[in-house]
Amino acid sequence: EKSPIQAHTTHKAQTGATRKTRSMSLCSVRERLRRTPLSDAVVRRIRALGLGRERGGAVRLSDEQLREGRRRELGRMGLIRAAANLDELPRAAEAELALAGRSNVGKSSLLNALVGKRSGGTTTRGLAPVQNRPGVTRSLNFYGSERRGARIVDMPGYGFAFASDGATAQWQAAMREFVVSRGGLLRVLLCVDARQSLRALDREFLLMLDREAGVPCLVVMTKCDLVPTSELARRFAVLEADLAELGLRGLRAGVHMVSSRTTAGVPELRRAIAREMPKGWLRFPRGGTEAAEVGGAEAKAGDAAEEEEVEAGAEPLGRTARRQRAKVAAVARLSQRVAAADAWARRKSRLSEQERSSRGRSRRRRQFGG
Ligand SMILES: Nc1nc2c(ncn2[C@@H]2O[C@H](COP(=O)(O)OP(=O)(O)O)[C@@H](O)[C@H]2O)c(=O)[nH]1
Ligand SMILES: [Mg+2]
């Protein structure tokens, strides 16, 4: 039995049809864009968010928008674990949000923008490594701050360019297993490059997420600073239509548009996430002081600001969300028991150095991809 993703990969290899299908679908997208009417409401929304690439340079954001976009949410996030295989996953005791999408669509950059982390001038760099080359993230990277339950998982892009087909298929099988069996995974943010349309791998992933894993999903158009407003509005309409066609039960209404480079649209996305995740998962600073803007004294000021934060006004949770929370709580209880049992077992019999290294070898053998 092959997964739809594996079947797709094999089909590509056998028929060599990739180039042909790709150029055909490209034509049809152009044609569809031409025929899609321009929605005034969407154009207004793009302008209000400060998105779209306009002639003569980037759209300008107000100081207020910039400040809001650069806010450091979720406290001091750090890399908790880079899992190169499914044996290395951290315990699923927390509420997790995973970023998924094709390679190079800007997942890691969006993670940096969401947590308000940046180094240098842009938010596309910072906490999670970013490179202008597909397939940089090849492990499941878990980010979080110990003090809070928030976890963001940076997933490797499906179909990364420089791996062999075999390794890619292995990765995809592993990603499937991750989203299907991960107890604490509450939502997935599916990222689509604003200059591209929904591709076969996106569709397959979304269907698998919906039908097999049952994980609700938010869709985000990334790099919206690179597309002219009217084209962006049309691409937005085409994407919404394509998503509607898939008939996903767990799809959250309303595609989000962001630029991780300028942080435009990021505050709005954070608010949408706060509504989806358990209360307190994502908090907003109460006061007007901008800890993230303090520069050198950032870490200290950030901690002080954290103390004052209040919980975001999350909307009452629906039945599904309540069930998800109950599931998370159950997993947390279970993993506490497992941890206690583990600690007890460790005390009783310390593994010899030799045993430990032979374990390491068999673990490496089970590694997938990259
Ligand atoms: N202009 C622009 N470039 C972006 C944006 N987000 C990401 N990029 C660039 O796209 C490339 C891939 O980004 P990355 O976050 O590593 O993508 P990932 O492979 O999906 O994690 C990098 O060169 C980023 O600087 C954005 O919002 N605007
Ligand atoms: Mg990445």
Image: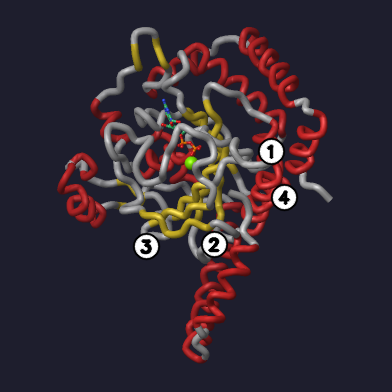
| Residue 89 circle label | 2
Element assignment for label 2: loop
Q: Which residue is mark 4?
A: 212
Name the foreground residue: 268 vs 350.
350
Distance Cα–Cα, label 3 vs label 4:
31 Å
Q: How many marks?
A: 4
Whole-Å distance between the Cαs marked 1 and 4?
A: 12 Å
How far across and how far down the image is residue 293, in percent?
Answer: 20, 39
Label 3 element class: loop
Residue that badge 3 annotates:
146
Identify the residue shown where x is 56% and y is 70%.
360
Mark 4 sits near ligand 1, with its Cβ under 8 Å away: no
Specify the amino acid type for callout 1.
Leu
Rounded to the nearest angstrom, the CA distance separating label 2 from label 3 is 16 Å
Q: Is residue 114 visible?
A: yes
Label 3: few (<14), some or many (≥20) within 10 Å?
Answer: few
Q: Identity of the amino acid at label 4? A: Glu
Q: Name the residue type under label 3.
A: Glu
